[in-house]
């Protein structure tokens, strides 16, 4: 290389990233024809990581601080480039900065319902929505698995990939938990805890840490929600099972009474379709009687027959316990009942 060409070359003394664009997670330092000065400074700010890459292979990784670039501070890159320990000339290498700030308030949702088995409803399709936050925790894995050699890699790009991971993991973790839909809806924090544990492991593979994850709502598609509403209504009315059928019938009969009052002919008019107004009366008595009537008392002993009472009276007379007049009077009353 001639002295003129050497003088024209530009050497980089300080490498740094001001992170002036929001939503950028990975940024490649623009080298062009520039070379990094041996002994130059690498400035890595808080919430950043810098990575030196040689021909697509990750070498040295630097955390926050100011680093002087020498063979001692770049051992892996030195080995890849086969430098001896006395190297003192400028060098070229790709340098990537990664933002490790927490990306907060990111929304997630199931574009399509997730089908799961449910012990209450057999099979249901569930929709869910919520918020999550994450950050880059392993720049080496993030570069190798996701961002690659692109000049800029944004939050929107990574979230396109995270969304697929999130939904697949949700379907798997919710299905494995066998948590009924009603329990999910009633305890969204429990559901979020279950899913977060599985998502943390799934995200870690890509060098991403899941900071927070919550479930804001769990719902069913409209047609399933309508069916659930009918079932809940039936349950509130007494249910449709054998042991609750009486309660449901009582509700239906009680609901029919105001309607009967509005119809011409009253209860008889309503009952005409069943055969007679008496049928409705019987239905009311049978369905409501059990709930409204007090528990039956012990059965009273059967009343003695007229003949038995006459024999008792005769016995009392023979023993002198009643007078002949009393006997004749009581006897007349009993015979009157017997003869009519």
Image (tube, helix red, strand yellow):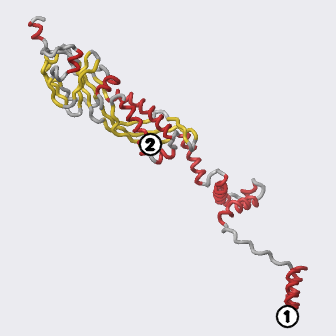
At which x and y percent is residue 340?
A: 89, 79
What's the mark number on residue 191? 2
At which x and y percent is residue 138?
A: 30, 29
Q: Nearer the viewer, mark 1 or mark 2?
A: 1
Closer to us: 155 or 44: 44
What's the mark number on residue 107? none
Spatial distance from mark 1 to mark 2, Cα to Cα?
A: 89 Å
Classify mark 1: residues with Cα within 10 Å, few (<14), some (14-19) or many (20+). few
Taking the image as shown, residue 242 lies to the left or right of residue 79, namely: right
Secondary structure of the residue carrying tag 1 is loop
Q: Is residue 337 above or below residue 269?
A: below
Identify which residue is drawn at 83% across, 92% down.
Answer: 321
Secondary structure of the residue carrying tag 2 is helix
Q: Earlier in the sequence, mark 1 or mark 2?
A: 2
Q: Is residue 122 above or below residue 274?
A: above
Taking the image as shown, residue 249 lies to the left or right of residue 124, namely: right
Classify mark 2: residues with Cα within 10 Å, few (<14), some (14-19) or many (20+). many
Taking the image as shown, residue 197 lies to the left or right of residue 281, namely: left
Q: Tell me whether the residue at label 1 lies in contact with that at label 2, contact meaning CB atoms closer than 8 angstroms.
A: no
Location of the N terminus by quadrant is top left
Q: Is residue 108 above or below residue 306?
A: above
At which x and y percent is residue 105?
A: 33, 38
Closer to us: 261 or 298: 298
Q: Is there any visible trace of residue 242 in the rendered image?
A: yes
**Quarter occupied by residue 224:** top right
**Quarter occupied by residue 280:** bottom right
Task: Return the residue found at the far right.
Answer: 339
Identify which residue is drawn at 69% across, 60% down.
Answer: 287
Closer to us: 57 or 85: 85
Residue where numbered disc 1 is placed: 320
Q: Is residue 69 above or below residue 329?
A: above
Identify which residue is drawn at 65% across, 65% down.
Answer: 292
């Amino acid at each position: 290389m001639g002295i003129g060409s050497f003088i024209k070359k530009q050497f980089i003394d300080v490498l740094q990233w001001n992170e002036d664009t929001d939503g950028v997670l990975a940024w490649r330092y623009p080298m062009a024809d520039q070379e990094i000065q041996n002994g130059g400074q690498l400035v890595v700010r808080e919430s950043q990581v810098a990575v030196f890459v040689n021909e697509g292979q990750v070498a040295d990784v630097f955390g926050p601080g100011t680093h002087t670039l020498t063979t001692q501070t770049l051992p892996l890159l030195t080995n890849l480039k086969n430098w001896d320990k006395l190297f003192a000339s400028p060098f070229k290498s790709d340098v990537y900065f990664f933002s490790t700030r927490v990306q907060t308030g990111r929304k997630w949702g199931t574009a399509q319902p997730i089908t799961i088995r449910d012990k209450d409803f057999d099979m249901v399709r569930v929709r869910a929505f919520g918020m999550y936050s994450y950050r880059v925790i392993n720049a080496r894995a993030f570069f190798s698995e996701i961002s690659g050699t692109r000049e800029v890699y944004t939050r929107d790009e990574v979230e396109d990939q995270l969304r697929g991971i999130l939904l697949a993991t949700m379907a798997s973790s919710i299905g494995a938990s066998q948590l009924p839909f009603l329990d999910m809806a009633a305890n969204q924090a429990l559901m979020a805890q279950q899913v977060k544990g599985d998502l943390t492991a799934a995200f870690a593979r890509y060098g991403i840490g899941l900071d927070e994850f919550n479930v804001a709502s769990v719902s069913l598609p409209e047609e399933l929600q309508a069916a659930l509403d009918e079932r809940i209504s039936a349950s509130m009315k007494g249910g449709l099972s054998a042991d609750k059928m009486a309660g449901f019938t009582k509700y239906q009969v009680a609901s029919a009474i105001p309607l009967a009052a509005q119809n011409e002919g009253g209860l008889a008019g309503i009952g005409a379709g069943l055969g007679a107004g008496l049928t409705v009366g019987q239905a009311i008595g049978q369905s409501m009687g059990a709930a409204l009537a007090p528990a039956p008392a012990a059965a009273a002993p059967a009343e003695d027959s007229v003949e038995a009472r006459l024999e008792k009276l005769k016995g009392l007379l023979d023993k002198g316990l009643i007078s002949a007049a009393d006997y004749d009077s009581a006897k007349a009353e009993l015979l009157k009942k017997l003869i009519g």
